[in-house]
Amino acid sequence: MTAIDTPAGSRGTSAPAGPNRPTGPGGSARTGTAHRARRIGLYALLVLVALIAGGPLYWLITSALKTNPQINSYPPHWFPTQLRWSNFSDAWNAAPFGRFFLNSLVVSVVGTAIELMAALLCAYAFVFLPFPGKRWLFMFLLGAMMVPGHVTLLPNFLTIAQLGWVNTWAGLIAPGLGSVFGTFLLRQHMMTLPREVMDAARIDGAGHLRTLFRVVLPMSRPMVITVAIVVMVTKWNDFIWPLIVTSSDNMRTLPVGLLFLKNQETYANWGAILAGTVMVIVPVLIVFFIAQRYIIAGLTQGAGK
């Protein structure tokens, strides 16, 4: 074999180009263009979804500052030419919004605190306490989530009426104290907690309540805040039950108060009605923006496991 000879198996051969191997400057350019096109398409989709979701909210806020002719005009005015701040004072004076706010605040805060405490205790028991029939009881609770809430309206009202709680805060709060949804979320989260930490707490002599509040609760803070906000927003926006269980203006909550305001204005002053709607949703938006990082952390916790 001479110096210029090569083995037969390697003569005239080269490494084949795989499907993901760049074949030259043209292939790299095409790959970069396709990547940019996908990103542009994704951003365009996100902008479209944001417009669909935020458009009604923008229209509500801007219309709350318009005059009635601007609200009813066609084509619509997308921005008020004259800011009418008096719509808010008109709405506040047309209905007892101060009392409505107080009722909604009491129902939301007290109801959320009791419901969250019950959900925490139930979730802890389902995860860390052995007792017979635990699996079947949890399946029964999951089945209760499938029952529409309207099915229980009549039994709840009859019970509240027999207790004499109509037109009271107790009647507004009591039927919603059991949270199957909160129990389910907290139970699923607690199942991901490291057992070594729980064993260490038991070795240190911690009882169940001390373990719950000193060990489990700090590690579950994002999920607990998520459940609390979901429950609070649900109670804040609840309309059917407060409408049924109250007949006095002094005990109505904000969603029912908006209906009262609309009846007072007899569909004439839509600026005041929309301003009242803005006053109802602003507290919920403030709470969400303050706690949004906890909500995201709670909903994504354990996703990487």
Image (cartoon, grey):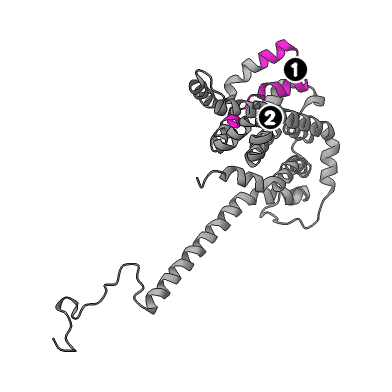
Looking at the image, residue 298 sits to the left or right of residue 285; the answer is left
What x and y, as percent, mark residue 228? 67, 36
Residue 197: % across, % down? 59, 37
Residue 239 in sight in this render: no
The CA distance from mark 1 to mark 2 is 38 Å
Q: Is residue 159 magenta?
A: yes
Question: Which type of secondary structure does the marked residue at label 1 adopt?
Answer: loop
What kind of residue is marked 2? Arg
Instruction: Depth check: give the residue in front, 211 or 177.
Output: 211
Q: Marks 1 and 2: which is nearer the front?
A: 2
Q: Considering only order in the chain, which callout, 2 or 1, is on the residue closer to the N terminus?
A: 1
Query: Residue sitting at 60 percent across and 20 percent down?
Result: 152
| Mark sitting on residue 166 | 1
According to the image, label 2 marks what residue?
Answer: 210
Q: Quadrant of the image for the N terminus?
A: bottom left
Residue at position x 51%, y 59% in the image: 42
Q: Quadrant of residue 181?
A: top right
Binning the other alpha carbons within 10 Å of mark 1 as few (below 14), some (14 to 19) or many (20 upward) gives many
Q: Residue at x 61, y 25 (%)?
A: 122
**Residue 108 placement: quadrant:** top right
In the image, residue 98 lies at what x, y percent? 84, 34
Q: Is 192 in the magenta?
A: no
- Asked if residue 72 lies left or right of residue 192, the reply is right
Front residue of 274/133: it is: 133
Residue found at the far bottom of this picture = 3
Q: In this image, 187 relative to 116: left or right? A: left
Q: Residues within 10 Å of mark 2 (few under 14, many from 20)?
A: some
Chief secondary structure of the magenta span?
Answer: helix
Observer-nearest residue: 186 or 102? 186
Magenta-highlighted residues: 157-184
The kind of residue on which mark 1 rests is Val
Taking the image as shown, residue 54 lies to the left or right of residue 7, namely right
